[in-house]
Image (cartoon, helix red, strand yellow):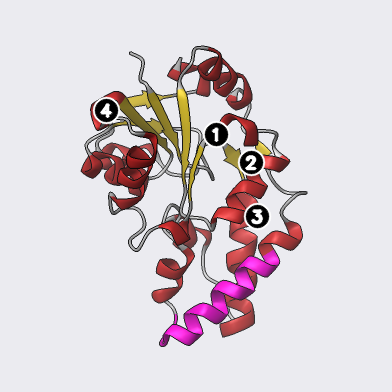
Amino acid sequence: MSFRLYLFDLDGTLIDSIALILASFHHTRERHFGDRLPDARYIAMLGTTLRDAFKHMADTPEAVEAMVATYVSYNMKHHDGMVRAYPGVPEMLGELSRRGSRLGLVTSKLRDNAIQGLRVTGLEDFFEIVIGAEDVKRGKPDPEPVLLALGRAGIAAADTVFVGDSPHDIESGRRAGVKTAAATWGPFPREALEAAGPDLWLEKPADLL
C-alpha cells in the first residue's frame, strides 16, 4: 500500500525526545507548583499542545502561558543534546522521497521548535509541509491539523496516511478521513493504540515502505 502524501507526527514517531519532554514537564511542574507528578501523567498528554496539557493544571490563562514559557525555555536550552532520530527513520524518509512521495509534519509543538528538532536530527529537508501548534485553533485529537495539511498539499484524504505514536494522532487522522498508521516504537502502550483503532501497524519505520 502506498500513498501520495505521508503525514507524520514528530515526537515519539520520528525523533526520540521523550526523555527531554518528561524533563521539561517535571521542571515546569516543580517551578510552578513545587511538586512532582508521575511520568505516566505526562505521557498520557503527549500528542496534545502544551496549552491543552497545562490547562489541566493551571487556574487562569495567564498561568497557562507562564507554564508554557517555562517549559519552552527549559526544553530549548537542553534540546540539541537530548534528541535523536529513531533508528531507521532517516532511511525510511529518504526512500519515500526517492519514490516521489510528498511528506508533511503534523505536530502539536510550536513550529519553530519542531523545525529545530528536524534540523538537529538531519530530517529537515524531507518535509515540504510543517503544521505546528500555532497554525490551528484546535490541536490533535481534533482533525483540524490534518485537514490543514491536506489543504496545503492539495491532496485528497483517500490518498494520505498519517503516522503517529499516540492515540491523539490516530483519532485526529481518523476524523480527518485519512488512513492511520500506529508507530509502536513510541512511549504509548499497545493497548492504548489498539483502543484508538489505527488502520495500519508499524513495528519499525521500514514497515511503512
User: Pointer 1: residues within 10 angstroms few (<14), some, or many (20+)?
Assistant: some
- Residue beneath the point at 63% across and 25% down: 90
Q: Where residue 70 sits in the image (x, y, percent)?
A: 63, 74
Figure check: 68 above or below 128: below
User: Mark 3 touching mark 1, by CB under 8 A?
Assistant: no
Mark toward the start of the polypeptide (4 vs 2): 2
* SS class, disc 3: helix
Q: How far, Cα to Cα, is label 3 from label 1?
A: 23 Å
- Identify residue for label 2: 118
Relative to 182, is 50 on the left or the right? Answer: right
- Identify residue for label 3: 20
Mark toward the start of the polypeptide (3 vs 4): 3
Residue type at tag 1: Phe
- Does residue 34 show up? no
- Identify residue for label 1: 127
| Region of the chain picked out in magenta, as a range | 58-74
- Does residue 32 show up? yes
